[in-house]
Amino acid sequence: MEHGRWSDGAAAAYERALRALARRALSEAELRAALAREGHSAEDIEAASLRLRQVGYLDDGRLAEQVVRSHARRGHAARRAEDELVRRGIERGSIDGALERQRLDAAPAPDLEQRLGELLAAERGPLDPRALRRVYNRLLRAGFEDWQVRAALEPHFLSQPDEEPDETAGAARRGRRIAVHDDDVT
């Protein structure tokens, strides 16, 4: 492949970057870090990145929009997409732009109450503390803030019956024998 006045190192970095991008969409920061780990010089990485941006193979704005759409389709809160984009090294302007376009272009993402209702309806059996913990963890993984989830779940925790209605139930769960007749040993 003709690379004009490129050094051999820049050409090698460009070829390696093409192979990496063929496998998976990467942010510029992720690609730069991968090339640096492989020992390419900063100048070669810069030349390869510049060329990739020029031909449209490296576009953090487009990647941000793809990630935001993907999270929205799965019903995740915008915060989860934002966290991923920050972790992947996308610039704040691209993140904000992608989130705003998604907000304007798409149907609104499910809010916390809607998602909570869906998860509670999907639970089988009584809403015991373990079921509520599962719902809590799913909401956190969906990208909702801890304080919001706790506030939304608080009425459900308060409506739970006592765990140990009497002394014998607690003793049985702790593995102790319960006296039924006076002559039984406890």
Image (cartoon, rainbow, N blue to C red):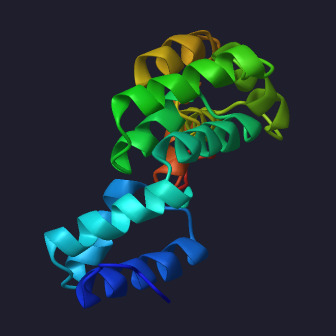
Q: Is residue 124 above or below residue 164?
A: below
In which image quadrant can residue 105 be found?
top right
Whether residue 157 can be seen here: no
Foreground residue among 30 and 141: 30
Foreground residue among 54 and 21: 54
User: In this rendering, would 14 be left or right of 64?
Assistant: left
User: In this rendering, would 166 be left or right of 124?
Assistant: left
Task: List x then y, in percent, for residue 78.
Answer: 56, 27
Task: List x then y, in percent, for residue 84.
Answer: 45, 44
Task: List x then y, in percent, for residue 66.
Answer: 64, 44
Question: What's the residue at 46%, 23% (across, down)?
Answer: 96
Foreground residue among 176 and 104: 104
User: In this rendering, would 133 be left or right of 40?
Assistant: right
Q: Is residue 33 above or below residue 133?
A: below
Question: What's the residue at 35%, 84% (across, down)?
Answer: 11
Question: What's the residue at 39%, 78% (across, down)?
Answer: 14
Whether residue 59 can be seen here: yes
In which image quadrant can residue 112 be found?
top right
Total labels: the figure holds 0
Task: List x then y, in percent, for residue 76.
Answer: 64, 34
Q: Is residue 114 above or below residue 182?
A: above
Q: Is residue 51 above or below residue 54?
A: below
User: In this rendering, would 158 be left or right of 95?
Assistant: right
